Image (spheres, rainbow, N blue to C red):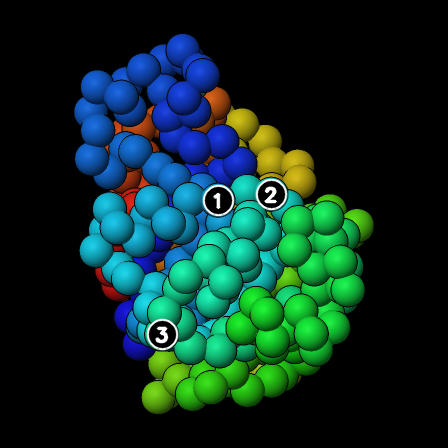
Amino acid sequence: MNVTFLGTSAANAYPEAFCQCKNCEQARELGGASLRKRSAALINSDLLIDLGPDIMTASFLHSRPLTHVRYYLQTHAHSDHLDPSHFLSRSPEYGVIGAPRLHFFASHGTLEQLANRLEADCAPDGFLSPQAGERLNVTVHQVEAMQIFTVGPYRVTAFPANHDPLVDPLLYAIEANGHSIFYGTDTAVLLEETWQALHEYGLHFDLVILDHTYGPDETGSDHLSAYQFIEHVTRMRQEGLMKNAGRAFATHISHPGNPVHPELVEFAVQHGYEVAYDGLVV
Ligand SMILES: [Zn+2]
Ligand SMILES: [Zn+2]
Ligand SMILES: [Zn+2]
């Protein structure tokens, strides 16, 4: 399995186009890995996590066409992770040729919000109706926390995120060919029931991708801070939830508290983790 990071910023891009803070100004000067788009990731060439607002730009900028995407996992419905206009733009009536049927997996809360947002635009009969599915070339699968389900060649387990309960947010473990990945954003400290479930399901991750919204000098709240990130990775290693050679990557990195990429990497190296950047393939 390989993972391509299509975006690694939090709700603001990094630099946020309207912001003159020191970090944003420095990111503009440095360019490269310090330029972050809103979070999304591609597993192999067929599984997309989050239909974020920047995936079109990410696709051509990092030479990762989404033409083979058949499966799609949505973490939650916050607008930095879900731009419903992509459903229209990838549909046959917008002239798209050859896009395979999309199998779309999301929680009840996310599907409800999405249906509301799409109603006016393109699916007056409801996003979840068979008619809308045919028009948009999508099959919807509702999933819930603690459920194990099959997504094409992948075995996926959903976990509850500790995040805005109104959007019923999910985190995902994705397994294939003896390898496994944990994709954990957006979330504050993981719930004890999630830790327990990770053990019960016997998961041992090769790759842990975790929320790193707040920087080394900030405290976490609705998201993880750098030190909470470190505590989570340390606990995962101590409790055998990561393989010996398992790697941990920070994503969902926001501009006010996280320094530009090279400086954040320096900090991360000292604490035993790595920092994802847009276009990185692991
Ligand atoms: Zn977010
Ligand atoms: Zn800024
Ligand atoms: Zn969120």
Question: Cβ–Cβ below 8 Å for labels 1 and 2?
Answer: yes
Figure quadrant of residue 73: bottom right
Q: Residue at x 66, y 40 (%)?
A: 222
The residue at which mark 2 appears reads as 79
Q: Of the residues under marks 1 and 2, which one precedes in the sequence?
A: 1
Is there any visible trace of residue 271 in the rendered image?
Answer: no
Is there any visible trace of residue 223 in the rendered image?
Answer: yes
Residue 67 coordinates in the image, percent (x, y): 33, 68
Quarter containing the N terminus: bottom left
Q: Residue at x 57, y 62 (%)?
A: 74
The residue at which mark 1 appears reads as 53
Measured along the vertical axis of the image, is residue 10 above or below residue 160?
Answer: above
The residue at which mark 3 appears reads as 98
Measured along the vertical axis of the image, is residue 104 above or below residue 84?
Answer: below
Residue 180 coordinates in the image, percent (x, y): 41, 77
Q: Is residue 163 left or right of residue 265?
A: right
